[in-house]
Image (spheres, rainbow, N blue to C red):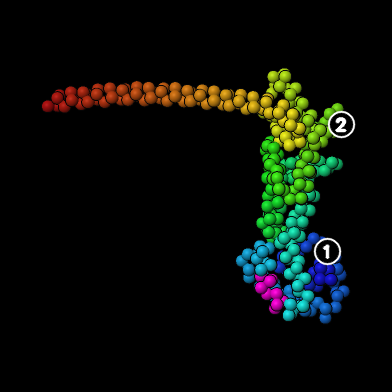
Protein backbone atom coordinates (compact mmCIF):
# COMPACT_ATOMS: atom_id res chain seq x y z
CA UNK A 1 0.00 0.00 0.00
CA UNK A 2 2.77 2.44 0.92
CA UNK A 3 4.69 1.67 -2.28
CA UNK A 4 1.58 2.35 -4.36
CA UNK A 5 0.93 5.61 -2.50
CA UNK A 6 4.56 6.74 -3.01
CA UNK A 7 4.45 5.83 -6.72
CA UNK A 8 1.37 7.93 -7.38
CA UNK A 9 2.51 10.82 -5.18
CA UNK A 10 0.07 10.42 -2.28
CA UNK A 11 3.03 9.83 0.07
CA UNK A 12 6.46 11.47 -0.02
CA UNK A 13 9.41 9.12 -0.56
CA UNK A 14 11.57 8.55 2.52
CA UNK A 15 15.16 9.72 2.07
CA UNK A 16 16.37 8.13 -1.20
CA UNK A 17 13.59 5.54 -1.40
CA UNK A 18 12.69 6.24 -5.05
CA UNK A 19 16.20 5.66 -6.35
CA UNK A 20 16.36 2.30 -4.58
CA UNK A 21 12.87 0.93 -5.15
CA UNK A 22 12.64 -1.18 -8.29
CA UNK A 23 9.28 -0.30 -9.76
CA UNK A 24 6.48 -1.56 -7.53
CA UNK A 25 2.74 -1.02 -7.97
CA UNK A 26 1.96 2.20 -9.81
CA UNK A 27 -1.03 3.12 -7.64
CA UNK A 28 -3.79 5.63 -8.37
CA UNK A 29 -3.86 9.00 -6.66
CA UNK A 30 -6.63 9.46 -4.14
CA UNK A 31 -7.54 5.78 -3.84
CA UNK A 32 -6.29 5.36 -0.28
CA UNK A 33 -8.12 7.13 2.52
CA UNK A 34 -6.41 10.08 4.17
CA UNK A 35 -7.17 8.63 7.59
CA UNK A 36 -4.84 5.78 6.65
CA UNK A 37 -2.12 7.88 4.99
CA UNK A 38 -2.11 10.83 7.39
CA UNK A 39 0.14 9.35 10.07
CA UNK A 40 2.36 7.71 7.43
CA UNK A 41 2.87 11.07 5.73
CA UNK A 42 3.64 12.82 9.01
CA UNK A 43 6.36 10.28 9.90
CA UNK A 44 7.90 10.52 6.43
CA UNK A 45 7.99 14.31 6.51
CA UNK A 46 9.57 14.12 9.96
CA UNK A 47 12.29 11.78 8.69
CA UNK A 48 12.98 13.76 5.51
CA UNK A 49 13.59 16.95 7.49
CA UNK A 50 16.36 15.19 9.41
CA UNK A 51 17.69 13.42 6.29
CA UNK A 52 17.97 16.71 4.42
CA UNK A 53 20.42 17.98 7.02
CA UNK A 54 22.70 14.95 6.81
CA UNK A 55 26.13 15.50 5.26
CA UNK A 56 26.46 11.82 4.26
CA UNK A 57 23.88 9.95 2.24
CA UNK A 58 25.66 6.57 2.42
CA UNK A 59 23.40 3.65 3.20
CA UNK A 60 25.04 2.79 6.52
CA UNK A 61 24.63 6.39 7.66
CA UNK A 62 20.99 6.55 6.55
CA UNK A 63 20.20 3.32 8.41
CA UNK A 64 22.01 4.59 11.50
CA UNK A 65 19.96 7.80 11.33
CA UNK A 66 16.67 5.89 11.01
CA UNK A 67 17.64 3.51 13.81
CA UNK A 68 18.47 6.39 16.17
CA UNK A 69 15.07 7.95 15.52
CA UNK A 70 13.09 4.72 15.37
CA UNK A 71 11.02 5.28 18.51
CA UNK A 72 9.99 8.79 17.51
CA UNK A 73 9.09 7.65 14.00
CA UNK A 74 7.04 4.71 15.26
CA UNK A 75 5.18 6.93 17.70
CA UNK A 76 4.03 8.95 14.71
CA UNK A 77 3.45 5.91 12.46
CA UNK A 78 3.43 2.53 14.17
CA UNK A 79 4.13 0.80 10.82
CA UNK A 80 7.32 2.79 10.16
CA UNK A 81 9.40 -0.31 10.96
CA UNK A 82 8.64 -1.35 7.36
CA UNK A 83 10.64 1.58 6.02
CA UNK A 84 13.56 0.80 8.30
CA UNK A 85 13.47 -2.84 7.23
CA UNK A 86 13.55 -1.77 3.57
CA UNK A 87 16.65 0.40 4.02
CA UNK A 88 18.49 -2.20 6.11
CA UNK A 89 17.91 -4.70 3.31
CA UNK A 90 19.06 -2.30 0.60
CA UNK A 91 22.36 -1.65 2.38
CA UNK A 92 23.07 -5.38 2.46
CA UNK A 93 21.76 -8.36 0.51
CA UNK A 94 18.86 -6.60 -1.23
CA UNK A 95 21.16 -3.89 -2.51
CA UNK A 96 23.68 -6.47 -3.66
CA UNK A 97 20.89 -8.30 -5.48
CA UNK A 98 19.79 -5.06 -7.14
CA UNK A 99 23.33 -4.42 -8.37
CA UNK A 100 23.63 -8.01 -9.61
CA UNK A 101 20.43 -7.64 -11.65
CA UNK A 102 21.75 -4.41 -13.18
CA UNK A 103 25.08 -5.99 -14.17
CA UNK A 104 23.56 -9.26 -15.40
CA UNK A 105 21.30 -7.35 -17.77
CA UNK A 106 24.39 -5.89 -19.48
CA UNK A 107 26.27 -9.14 -20.07
CA UNK A 108 26.31 -11.11 -23.34
CA UNK A 109 24.40 -14.38 -23.67
CA UNK A 110 24.40 -17.29 -26.09
CA UNK A 111 21.95 -15.35 -28.26
CA UNK A 112 22.90 -11.73 -27.53
CA UNK A 113 26.29 -10.35 -28.56
CA UNK A 114 27.63 -7.12 -27.05
CA UNK A 115 31.05 -5.49 -27.16
CA UNK A 116 33.39 -5.66 -24.17
CA UNK A 117 34.06 -1.92 -24.34
CA UNK A 118 30.36 -1.04 -24.24
CA UNK A 119 29.66 -3.31 -21.26
CA UNK A 120 32.72 -2.01 -19.40
CA UNK A 121 31.55 1.59 -19.88
CA UNK A 122 28.06 0.76 -18.57
CA UNK A 123 29.39 -1.14 -15.54
CA UNK A 124 31.63 1.82 -14.68
CA UNK A 125 28.58 4.08 -15.00
CA UNK A 126 26.87 2.04 -12.26
CA UNK A 127 29.60 3.28 -9.90
CA UNK A 128 28.08 6.74 -10.20
CA UNK A 129 24.51 5.65 -9.46
CA UNK A 130 22.97 6.40 -6.08
CA UNK A 131 22.05 2.75 -5.53
CA UNK A 132 25.77 1.84 -5.77
CA UNK A 133 26.74 4.54 -3.29
CA UNK A 134 23.98 3.44 -0.92
CA UNK A 135 25.03 -0.23 -0.79
CA UNK A 136 27.71 -1.38 1.64
CA UNK A 137 31.34 -1.96 0.68
CA UNK A 138 30.83 -5.69 0.25
CA UNK A 139 28.22 -5.14 -2.46
CA UNK A 140 30.25 -2.36 -4.07
CA UNK A 141 33.34 -4.57 -4.23
CA UNK A 142 31.44 -7.06 -6.39
CA UNK A 143 30.80 -4.41 -9.04
CA UNK A 144 34.40 -3.17 -8.83
CA UNK A 145 35.60 -6.75 -9.39
CA UNK A 146 33.38 -7.13 -12.46
CA UNK A 147 34.75 -3.87 -13.88
CA UNK A 148 38.29 -5.12 -13.23
CA UNK A 149 37.65 -8.41 -15.07
CA UNK A 150 36.11 -6.60 -18.03
CA UNK A 151 38.98 -4.11 -18.05
CA UNK A 152 41.53 -6.94 -18.24
CA UNK A 153 39.79 -8.52 -21.23
CA UNK A 154 39.35 -5.15 -22.94
CA UNK A 155 43.09 -4.51 -22.51
CA UNK A 156 44.08 -7.91 -23.91
CA UNK A 157 44.84 -9.57 -20.57
CA UNK A 158 43.42 -12.72 -19.03
CA UNK A 159 41.14 -11.67 -16.13
CA UNK A 160 41.90 -12.68 -12.57
CA UNK A 161 39.30 -14.81 -10.78
CA UNK A 162 39.19 -15.03 -7.00
CA UNK A 163 39.21 -18.54 -5.57
CA UNK A 164 36.51 -17.61 -3.04
CA UNK A 165 34.30 -15.65 -5.44
CA UNK A 166 30.64 -15.13 -4.51
CA UNK A 167 27.96 -17.12 -6.29
CA UNK A 168 26.92 -14.19 -8.42
CA UNK A 169 30.49 -13.39 -9.45
CA UNK A 170 30.73 -17.00 -10.60
CA UNK A 171 27.58 -16.40 -12.65
CA UNK A 172 29.11 -13.27 -14.19
CA UNK A 173 32.28 -15.23 -14.98
CA UNK A 174 30.18 -17.73 -16.91
CA UNK A 175 28.79 -14.86 -18.98
CA UNK A 176 32.29 -13.68 -19.92
CA UNK A 177 32.82 -16.64 -22.22
CA UNK A 178 30.22 -15.23 -24.61
CA UNK A 179 32.62 -12.40 -25.42
CA UNK A 180 34.84 -15.05 -27.02
CA UNK A 181 33.44 -15.88 -30.44
CA UNK A 182 34.84 -16.68 -33.88
CA UNK A 183 33.37 -17.88 -37.16
CA UNK A 184 34.40 -21.19 -38.68
CA UNK A 185 32.85 -21.50 -42.11
CA UNK A 186 29.16 -20.87 -41.49
CA UNK A 187 29.35 -21.86 -37.83
CA UNK A 188 29.66 -19.37 -34.99
CA UNK A 189 31.92 -20.78 -32.29
CA UNK A 190 31.54 -19.43 -28.75
CA UNK A 191 33.42 -19.87 -25.47
CA UNK A 192 35.92 -22.72 -25.17
CA UNK A 193 35.38 -23.84 -28.77
CA UNK A 194 36.16 -20.33 -30.03
CA UNK A 195 39.24 -20.04 -27.78
CA UNK A 196 40.54 -23.40 -29.08
CA UNK A 197 40.08 -22.20 -32.66
CA UNK A 198 42.04 -19.03 -31.86
CA UNK A 199 44.85 -21.13 -30.36
CA UNK A 200 45.04 -23.21 -33.54
CA UNK A 201 45.25 -20.04 -35.62
CA UNK A 202 48.19 -18.89 -33.51
CA UNK A 203 50.04 -22.16 -34.03
CA UNK A 204 49.40 -21.92 -37.78
CA UNK A 205 50.94 -18.44 -37.83
CA UNK A 206 53.92 -19.74 -35.89
CA UNK A 207 54.60 -22.28 -38.62
CA UNK A 208 54.51 -19.56 -41.32
CA UNK A 209 56.76 -17.21 -39.34
CA UNK A 210 54.14 -14.43 -39.25
CA UNK A 211 53.66 -14.41 -35.49
CA UNK A 212 53.03 -11.08 -33.74
CA UNK A 213 51.54 -9.81 -30.47
CA UNK A 214 48.28 -8.81 -32.16
CA UNK A 215 47.65 -12.40 -33.21
CA UNK A 216 48.30 -13.56 -29.64
CA UNK A 217 45.85 -11.15 -28.00
CA UNK A 218 42.64 -13.20 -28.24
CA UNK A 219 44.03 -16.55 -27.00
CA UNK A 220 45.75 -14.62 -24.21
CA UNK A 221 42.76 -12.68 -22.89
CA UNK A 222 40.50 -15.75 -23.17
CA UNK A 223 43.20 -18.03 -21.79
CA UNK A 224 41.03 -19.37 -18.97
CA UNK A 225 38.87 -21.10 -21.60
CA UNK A 226 41.82 -23.11 -22.96
CA UNK A 227 42.90 -26.55 -21.82
CA UNK A 228 46.29 -26.98 -20.14
CA UNK A 229 47.88 -28.33 -23.34
CA UNK A 230 46.45 -25.45 -25.39
CA UNK A 231 47.78 -22.90 -22.90
CA UNK A 232 51.25 -24.48 -23.11
CA UNK A 233 51.17 -24.48 -26.89
CA UNK A 234 50.28 -20.78 -27.02
CA UNK A 235 52.72 -19.77 -24.26
CA UNK A 236 55.84 -20.73 -26.23
CA UNK A 237 55.27 -18.49 -29.29
CA UNK A 238 54.05 -15.69 -27.03
CA UNK A 239 57.31 -15.75 -25.08
CA UNK A 240 59.28 -15.79 -28.35
CA UNK A 241 57.44 -12.71 -29.65
CA UNK A 242 57.89 -10.90 -26.33
CA UNK A 243 61.65 -11.55 -26.43
CA UNK A 244 61.80 -10.35 -30.03
CA UNK A 245 59.97 -7.17 -29.04
CA UNK A 246 62.39 -6.58 -26.17
CA UNK A 247 65.39 -7.07 -28.47
CA UNK A 248 63.93 -4.69 -31.03
CA UNK A 249 63.16 -2.08 -28.35
CA UNK A 250 66.73 -2.33 -27.05
CA UNK A 251 68.17 -1.90 -30.56
CA UNK A 252 65.96 1.10 -31.27
CA UNK A 253 66.91 2.65 -27.92
CA UNK A 254 70.62 2.15 -28.63
CA UNK A 255 70.30 3.67 -32.10
CA UNK A 256 68.42 6.63 -30.69
CA UNK A 257 71.05 7.14 -27.98
CA UNK A 258 73.86 6.99 -30.56
CA UNK A 259 72.09 9.52 -32.76
CA UNK A 260 71.66 11.89 -29.83
CA UNK A 261 75.36 11.54 -28.92
CA UNK A 262 76.45 12.41 -32.47
CA UNK A 263 74.08 15.35 -32.53
CA UNK A 264 75.46 16.61 -29.22
CA UNK A 265 79.05 16.24 -30.46
CA UNK A 266 78.26 18.16 -33.66
CA UNK A 267 76.62 20.90 -31.65
CA UNK A 268 79.67 21.14 -29.38
CA UNK A 269 82.02 21.40 -32.37
CA UNK A 270 79.88 24.11 -33.95
CA UNK A 271 79.77 26.05 -30.67
CA UNK A 272 83.53 25.74 -30.28
CA UNK A 273 84.13 27.00 -33.83
CA UNK A 274 81.80 29.91 -33.27
CA UNK A 275 83.61 30.74 -30.04
CA UNK A 276 86.98 30.76 -31.84
CA UNK A 277 85.64 33.03 -34.58
CA UNK A 278 84.28 35.39 -31.98
CA UNK A 279 87.61 35.36 -30.12
CA UNK A 280 89.53 36.18 -33.32
CA UNK A 281 87.08 38.95 -34.08
CA UNK A 282 87.55 40.41 -30.63
CA UNK A 283 91.37 40.28 -30.99
CA UNK A 284 91.28 42.14 -34.35
CA UNK A 285 88.96 44.74 -32.85
CA UNK A 286 91.30 45.29 -29.89
CA UNK A 287 94.34 45.67 -32.22
CA UNK A 288 92.47 48.25 -34.37
CA UNK A 289 91.54 50.22 -31.27
CA UNK A 290 95.16 50.24 -30.07
CA UNK A 291 96.38 51.51 -33.44
CA UNK A 292 93.69 54.23 -33.42
CA UNK A 293 94.75 55.39 -29.96
CA UNK A 294 98.42 55.45 -31.03
CA UNK A 295 97.63 57.55 -34.06
CA UNK A 296 95.62 59.97 -31.96
CA UNK A 297 98.51 60.42 -29.53
Outermost residue toward the top?
208
Relative to 59, 195 lies left or right: right
Is the residue marked by circle 1 packed among few (<14), some (14-19), or many (20+) residues within 10 Å?
A: few
Q: CA distance from mark 2 to mark 1?
A: 43 Å
Comes first in the chain, label 2 or label 1: 1
Please say whether residue 243 is one of the residues in the magenta stretch.
no
Asked if labels 1 and 2 touch by Cβ distance under 8 angstroms, the answer is: no
Q: How many marks?
A: 2
10 Å neighbourhood of mark 2: few (<14), some, or many (≥20)?
few
For residue 67: magenta?
yes
The part of the chain drawn in magenta is 65-73
Q: Is residue 242 above or below residue 142?
A: above
Residue in the image at 85% along x and 41% along y: 111
Residue 286 visible in the picture? yes
Regarding residue 17, the answer to whether it shows in the image is no
- Residue 40 appears in which quarter of the rendering? bottom right
Q: Which residue is at a point 80% across and 69% down the rendered structure image?
A: 6
Mark 2 lies on a secondary structure that is strand
Residue carrying label 2: 187
Q: Residue 49 appears at what percent x and percent y?
A: 67, 73
- Report the disc number at residue 24: 1
| Residue at (68, 55) in percent of width and height | 138
Quadrant location of the C terminus?
top left
Residue 187 drawn at (x, y percent): 87, 31
In the current view of this chain or complex, which residue is farthest to the left?
297
Q: Quadrant of residue 72?
A: bottom right
Q: Picture coordinates of residue 239 (x, y %)?
A: 64, 27
Labelled disc at residue 77: none
Question: Which corner quadrant holds the N terminus?
Answer: bottom right
User: Residue at image x 83%, y 63%?
Assistant: 24
For label 1, the SS is loop
Secondary structure predominantly adopted by residues drawn in magenta: helix
Amino acid sequence: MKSAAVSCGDLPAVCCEMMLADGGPAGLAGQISECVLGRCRAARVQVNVGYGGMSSKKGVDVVAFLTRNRKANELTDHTFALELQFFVGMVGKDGERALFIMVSALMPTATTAVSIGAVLAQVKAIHQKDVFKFCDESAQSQIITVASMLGDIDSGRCPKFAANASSWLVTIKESLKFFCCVTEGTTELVGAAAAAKMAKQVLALKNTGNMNLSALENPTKFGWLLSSSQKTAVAAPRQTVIEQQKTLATAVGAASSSSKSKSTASSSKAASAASRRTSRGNTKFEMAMAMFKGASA
